[in-house]
Amino acid sequence: MERVEFLKLIDEIYKGNEYIPWRELNKSPQQAKFIGSLLKDRKKILNLFDQYDVGKKGGISGKSLPITVKILNKDDENPAVEKYVGFDNRWLVIYFGISPELENFVSIVMWPSESESSKNCYRIILSLLKERKRSLKFEGSYHIILPNEIHPQRVEKLEIERDEQLFYNWQYFPFIKDVGETLSKPIFAPNYRKVLLRNINGQLFEDYVTLRTTIGSIVDIKGNEIKVKVPFLKSKPHSFTFRLRHNIQKGIKRNFLYYFLLIEKAGERIPEVLDIESAEIEDAFAHCLAFELYRRFINNVSRDKYRRYAVLQYNKEKFGLEIEKEKISNLFGICSIGEGKKLFRKYSSLLYKIYRKENTKRISSNINLWDFILKTYLFPYFKIDEENDRIYYFPILFRHYSRGFICEKILELNKMIRSYTFRGVYNGNH
């Protein structure tokens, strides 16, 4: 099926039309698989919520869930297209980024000519474009089309927040990290969202995409395609092919390590590089360790633990009762500190072998590398409870006071999303 027709088909599914031209679609197994997954998994999402919580378009109110978003298409001052709606033309504006609270890629969809709050949101985002160290905070009755499309039409409060160091850098988000075993697996189909991208001529086009991050060394460059040696944690490493978008101007070199922010289009095999940053061998250690710690957390944490923490949070908000660190690490613990160090040593040895020929800086022997990586790369998300010998992950949505039931639902959504890349590919306990 032609790309334009495929994207129209996704539009129709989101409008509730489930007629699928399977004969034509089956000519492309990749597209057919995506559509089948989208039909099935949208229903799973809606079944997580009570019928009265979900609107006609499959969305819920964000009133009980303050969130922040680090916008990633900041280089585009006007990602807007004119759309014919009803009896007139209206402007559609879409920005996208990462929300640490939702632990996910998100799109922000605005109709500035239709809604005063959308217009205000657009105005605030424009003021953010040159502020690299700031993010956007939504509070009140904004709308989320599940799992990750934000509509600010009824948002009650929009603020610009100063980023915490490293907290909002895309290289360090643990929940969108991939290693070799998972990068070849598809992401949960409803996680792909419509965005506006520019082609080499600067013209905007619509597509359904999701974001992933990985790390690796470039082994070959041919035109706009690169081959990248990504770390595998259990299997023998092999190269992946990525396409460089036309806006990637950085002088990349063979045999050097880089972080890659990848944009993956629905029904396509080869991801595109949206952004790239230089990396060293310790970045690879931290990437793999964060991937595995988060994978263990999301696989093992339960709704009951989120519910119990929400009660503690309510008691703090209502009665001023402090939450003890031990209680947090009990609920959200991943492994002992000794086990974390063992994982670190295993990955260090493995990655030195994989990247022994790469051009990376030598690490000073005076540095305690475990402490350095923990405090520099992992600390925004992963914490240490020395007294009780635990490494734990603190869910970012609990940084703000949020009603317990919505936090449990977000957890279930994230389990659903990650299960596609984790299940059957990577058992992890090694």
Image (cartoon, helix red, strand yellow):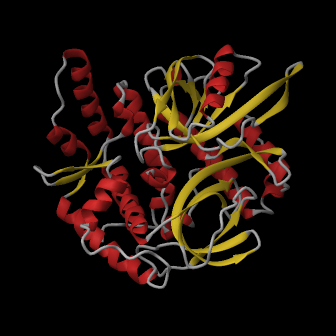
- Report x, y in % for residue 58: 60, 29
- The correct choice, above or below, for 418 with respect to 70 in the image is below
- Report x, y in % for residue 343: 28, 68
Image quadrant where one finds the N terminus: bottom right
Quadrant in the rendering for residue 112: top right
- Report x, y in % for residue 63: 47, 20
Choose between 132 and 410: the one closer to the eye: 132
Residue located at (43% from left, 68% from top): 284
Quadrant in the rendering for residue 394: top left
- The correct choice, above or below, for 182 with respect to 102 in the image is below
| Side of 391 relative to 85 (left or right) | left
Residue 18 showing in the rendered view: no
- The correct choice, above or below, for 23 with respect to 76 in the image is below
- Report x, y in % for residue 419: 46, 54
| Side of 343 relative to 148 (left or right) | left
Image quadrant where one finds the C terminus: bottom left
Residue located at (45% from left, 81% from top): 354
| Side of 298 relative to 77 (left or right) | left
Quadrant in the rendering for residue 252: bottom right
Choose between 14 and 345: the one closer to the eye: 345
Q: Residue furthest left?
A: 387
